[in-house]
Amino acid sequence: MYFPIYLLLVFLILYVSTPQTGGARNKAFYIYPSEFKDDMMAMIRQGRVWPTVFTPVKNPENADFTIKVVPRKQMDSMLITPEKVEYYPNTKKRIHFSYTVNGQHIYIDEENWRNGVLESGLSVKDYRQYVLFHEIGHVLGYGHQPCLTKKCPIMYQMTRGPPTGYGQEGVELGPVDVKGLKLLKRL
Ligand SMILES: [Zn+2]
């Protein structure tokens, strides 16, 4: 059968010029337990941190990533090995982090979520925003960044507390890592 070459060209042009979904631009997520859903959903809806469309799904099997709030005891038995235990400098107070495993599964320390972390210098609301968008940053492939200005970038580990003299005004929730953003576009 004769197939006009110009039709093939039209298809090609349409294909190339249509924005492709998937990859880092579109991510389906699932939150559990349901108790934390409304709060997190509202933050994700309002947050303008990452250039990604986040879509909630009803079945975790259809999610690109999951967010789970985990009781501290369970966190310890699930994820913490002795070499991972860290203390705030010159104290015996343990630092309790949240984790993203395999770039897919976010585990947020329940006590941190409920009460915030005093050492971070953030209000409970700001700490929640920070930890949620920080871990989502890991899902999108971002690594940690240093805090070198008054506002620490979202990928700085704020749970440690800001470095002396920095971070007194809270966490920068904007996309500060330009290099990272360029990298993201290639994903
Ligand atoms: Zn991190």
Image (cartoon, helix red, strand yellow):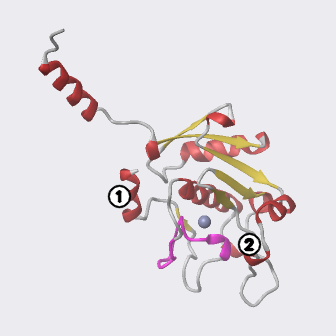
The residue positioned farthest toward the top in the image shown: 1
Name the residue rendered at 70%, 40% in the picture: 38
Q: Does residue 81 appear to the left or right of 154 in the view shown?
A: right
Name the residue rendered at 58%, 82% in the picture: 163
Choose between 115 and 56: the one closer to the eye.
Answer: 56
Residue matched to label 1: 182
Name the residue rendered at 33%, 36% in the picture: 19
Q: Residues within 10 Å of mark 1 (few under 14, many from 20)?
A: few
Q: Nearer the viewer, mark 1 or mark 2?
A: 1
Q: Does residue 183 appear to the left or right of 158 in the view shown?
A: left
- Across and down, in percent, residue 145 comes to 50, 72
> Which label is found at residue 118?
2
Height in image: 117 above or below 149? above
User: Which amino acid lies under the numbered mark 1 shown in the image of this protein?
Assistant: Lys
- Across and down, in percent, residue 153 comes to 51, 68
Q: Is residue 62 magenta?
A: no
Height in image: 112 above or below 162? above
Q: CA distance from mark 1 to mark 2?
A: 34 Å
The residue positioned farthest toward the front in the image shown: 1
- Across and down, in percent, residue 11 comes to 23, 24
Choose between 42 and 65: the one closer to the eye.
Answer: 65
- Across and down, in percent, residue 63 comes to 61, 38
Height in image: 60 above or below 71? above
Q: Which residues are magenta?
A: 145-160
Split into quadrants, the picture shows ligand 1 in the one at bottom right
Name the residue rendered at 79%, 54% in the picture: 70
Q: Does residue 175 appear to the left or right of 138 in the view shown?
A: left
Local SS, label 1: helix
